[in-house]
Amino acid sequence: MCNKYGGNLPNAVGIPEEQLREAAKSAVCKINIDSDSRLAMTAAIRKHMAENPSHFDPRQYLKPAREEMKKMYIHKIVNVLGSDGKAE
């Protein structure tokens, strides 16, 4: 989505989800998904600005950006890392 809305990040990708699943099943204690988070937020901001060029208030584009990050984290926690409900 970043590149679709004007980004120039052809090689910016997070760790493939299959590799994350394998790491989560092994003895790996920490899995970093920050690249995915930054890409999700940047993509949402770019999308919002492309679709709403008159907006300039950060509250207008940061809210959807935070929501996109939240969706990404929920997806990774539930569908990739298998860690849903394990913080109890």
Image (spheres, rainbow, N blue to C red):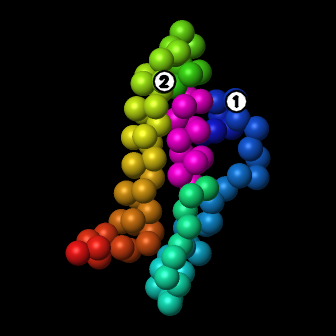
Q: In the shown orientation, is residue 76 left or right of residue 8?
A: left
Give me the C-alpha separation between circle 2 and circle 1.
19 Å
Whether residue 39 is visible to the viewer of this picture, yes or no, is yes
Residue 6: which numbered mark, if any?
Answer: 1
Q: Nearer the viewer, residue 38 or 19?
A: 38
Q: In the shown orientation, is residue 17 left or right of residue 4?
A: left
Query: Residue visible at 54% across and 45% down?
Result: 40
* Callout 2 crowding tier (Cα within 10 Å): few <14, some 14–19, many ≥20: few
- Give the magenta part as a residue range: 36-47
As displayed, is residue 35 above or below residue 79?
A: above
As displayed, is residue 49 above or below residue 39?
A: above
- Indicate the position of residue 73 as horizontal and vertical percent values: 42, 56
SS class, disc 2: helix
* Callout 1 crowding tier (Cα within 10 Å): few <14, some 14–19, many ≥20: few
Q: In the shown orientation, is residue 18 left or right of residue 60?
A: right
Q: In the displayed image of the protein, which residue is found farthest to the bottom? A: 27
